Amino acid sequence: MLTHNLGYPRIGSKRELKIVSEQYWSGKTSRKNLLQVGKNIRKENWLLQKESGIDLIPSNDFSFYDQVLDMSLMVGAIPKRYQGLLTNKLSYLDLYFAMARGYQKDSYDITAMEMTKWFDTNYHYIVPEFYKNQEFTLFSTKVIDEFYEAKEIGIQTKPVLIGPVSYLLLGKAKGESFQTIDLVNKLIPVYIDLIKKLVSLGAEWIQFDEPFLALDLTKKEKEVYKQVYLKLKSSFPDLKIMIVTYFESIQDNLELIADGLLIDAIHIDLVRCPEQLDVVLENIPERIHLSLGIVDGRNIWKNNYQKSLEYIQEAKARRKENTILIAPSCSLLHSPCDLDLEEDNQNLSTEIKDWLSFAKQKLRELSTLKALTLSEKGDKVFENLERNIRSHENRSNSERIHNSEVDEKVKAISKQDIVRENSFNLRKEVQHKNLNLPVFPTTTIGSFPQTKKVRSWRYQYKKGNISLTQYEEYIKEEIIKVIHWQEEIGLDVLVHGEFERNDMVEYFGEKLNGFAFTKFGWVQSYGSRCVKPPIIYGSVKRPNPMTVDWTLFAQSLTSKPVKGMLTGPVTILQWSFVRDDQPKSVTCNEIALAIRDEVQDLEDNGIKIIQIDEPALREGLPLKQVDHKSYFEWAIQSFKIASSAVSNGTQIHTHMCYSEFNDIIDEIANLDADVITIECSRSQMELLNAFADYKYPNEIGPGVYDIHAPRVPQDEEIIELIRKAQKYIPIDQLWINPDCGLKTRGWEETEKALKTMVGAAKQLRKET
Ligand code: GLN
Ligand code: ZN
């Protein structure tokens, strides 16, 4: 039985890659230095995996930005707009970064490639762009170079490639419409070229990531799968081809895999889909090795050895041991690097630390599981098992995680708790009387620029260099400024600016019971961007109000309404590491009850508008259609628990961004928020078409300018967009606002853009 790994985090345990990349982009360090840091990380990772006893260690899992973009360069899928850079002999690396981030230099103004979420994770990949007459060539030899690099330090690796079928399915057809999968015959020769070189250097195993093989496939896609792996196997009869799936179960494609694919190993995700083990063992013949993904690659909990050993025993009972491999469920890219770095983190108790395992620890778990499988009772390694059992017992019995009061409250949630007092039509009248807003009311999404100054105060306060009072004084000054400024330019519904928040989830997590925080638990989100998700380990409870003081302070400065600003339960859940000992839906309900109390407190204190952000509602959607319904049931219920306690006159807003929403309008309508502000400008209001078709009854603020770039919109552009919006949505339902929060923007562009936006609204009011 072999242990193997599918991929290791490449940001460096102290985010070395992030730091050096950003320095390189701003011209503060040399390419040589950047390349060296990359090389060091790869070496460290390989050696670490070797020391941890991993039998098959991956290579080409490293990336300077994204593994899908790496693949696009490998096969020469470089969109035309970058050709000028190519002929101008821009270095390979700079071309690569230009594709990822755009290129605005030396009279060039080339947009970046699109980025989107990697399945249901918070990792974003660069979407390949394909054209109908697309040609592929072997453009970069990264995978070969890295295989060779590892070999030089004495490590025979298993190169990782995104499988050709998944690579095509991840891409988007541009220009003339066609199916990307139709490019397969042009693509395969390049893969064959690459593999030929790897094999000649001595590669025995190659890992092909084919996550789509665990999703719903069309007949045609299945045919292409057969064709591709037939071709690869017949070209390389001695190569061991391993296909890797994750995040879903392969049970619907078993026949295809067992009878149709000429492959040597299949990897399955037993953490997400343990129920597939039985049918997989039943149907996958022994000639195909089976890799059991038993160590959670996406969450931070210590492996349950007893459970993992059961899976291994089950497999051993039904096939030869030397046809079994064990591995993490998916690439460890989605895990933080090293729990050891948390040693002196005071915010993480020793007790909780004992429940956790990050990438480095997960490797050890694998080799321990292998040792446990191969040894006899009484061997020394069984002490590990006993310790593991004790640790799990401690966790499940710990007082920290249980709170019967919270359990009771969740159980007591009734139908009445999840509906507003009256229907929207009635509420609307009361709210309009209450708020007395003009047509085309203007507002923002919540945050205003988080300047270096603001962040440094928080840093100083956390370090103990300034007192809480001092810190709060600073924040108050910012709020005073931002309230007056909003009044001055004539916005109708004001916000306090969210200056006190480091992050929209972390802020609430820090104020709620049941959350813990790491110091170095960084996970790559995209490129050099990393996130440090909180850990939800126990019952969620709100010991004290979280936002009331700041909101009331802001409201005390103005007679215009100030929106209370909260993060919704689904988003808090989605952007945290969650408990694996109870269903997500229960945790989400607990968070929802805490937010509900906050909403109630805001209302009791006279706040008339409360926004509950749910940007992550869409991203929590399960990968398979059959699971959508039950997801939405609990997700929508959680939002409604949070939002329904208020009286008719209190206006509930929600906000969404980051995704396409065309196909979930029904669900958005079921949230029954009085107003939704939604990202829209990049799609030129096209999204509203779906709202119009649905006859969406509540109010909508379609974003009128993109906040992701510093560019200031012109008034005609905004007016044009709002006119377009009116074609879809009746005037009395329309709000005017930017696409999203402004925290990543500078003040200068923010001032200009918002003035323009308010001006546009005033202009349009004249016409009504
Ligand atoms: N209220 C948040 C803000 O303005 C919303 C952020 C988001 O949608 N991601 O920053
Ligand atoms: Zn947003």
Image: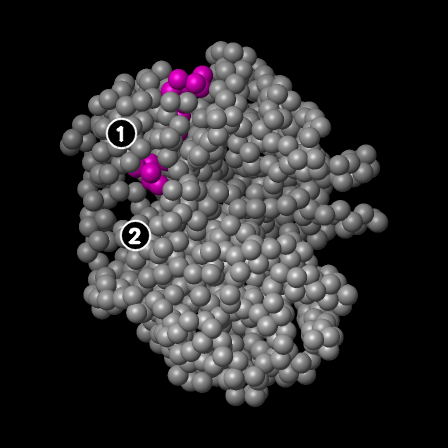
Foreground residue among 577 and 494: 494
In this rendering, the answer to whether 227 lies above or below 76 is above
The magenta region covers 257-274
Q: On the image, which quarter does residue 536 sit in?
A: bottom left
Foreground residue among 419 and 257: 419
Residue at 23%, 49% (x, y): give it.
391
Q: Residue furthest left?
A: 378
Q: Which residue is identified by label 1?
A: 278
Please name the colour scheme applied to the rendered image. Answer: one colour
Q: Is the N terminus in the top left, top right, bottom left or bottom right quadrant?
A: top left
Q: Position of residue 436 (x, y in %)?
A: 56, 83
Q: Is the C terminus in the top left, top right, bottom left or bottom right quadrant?
A: bottom right
Q: CA distance from mark 1 to mark 2?
A: 22 Å
Q: Position of residue 400 (x, y in %)?
A: 25, 62
Q: Position of residue 689 (x, y in %)?
A: 60, 55
**Is disc 2 placed on a helix, strand or loop?**
loop
The three-letter code of the residue at mark 2 reads Pro
Res 583 label: 2
Q: On the image, which quarter does residue 175 sit in?
A: top right
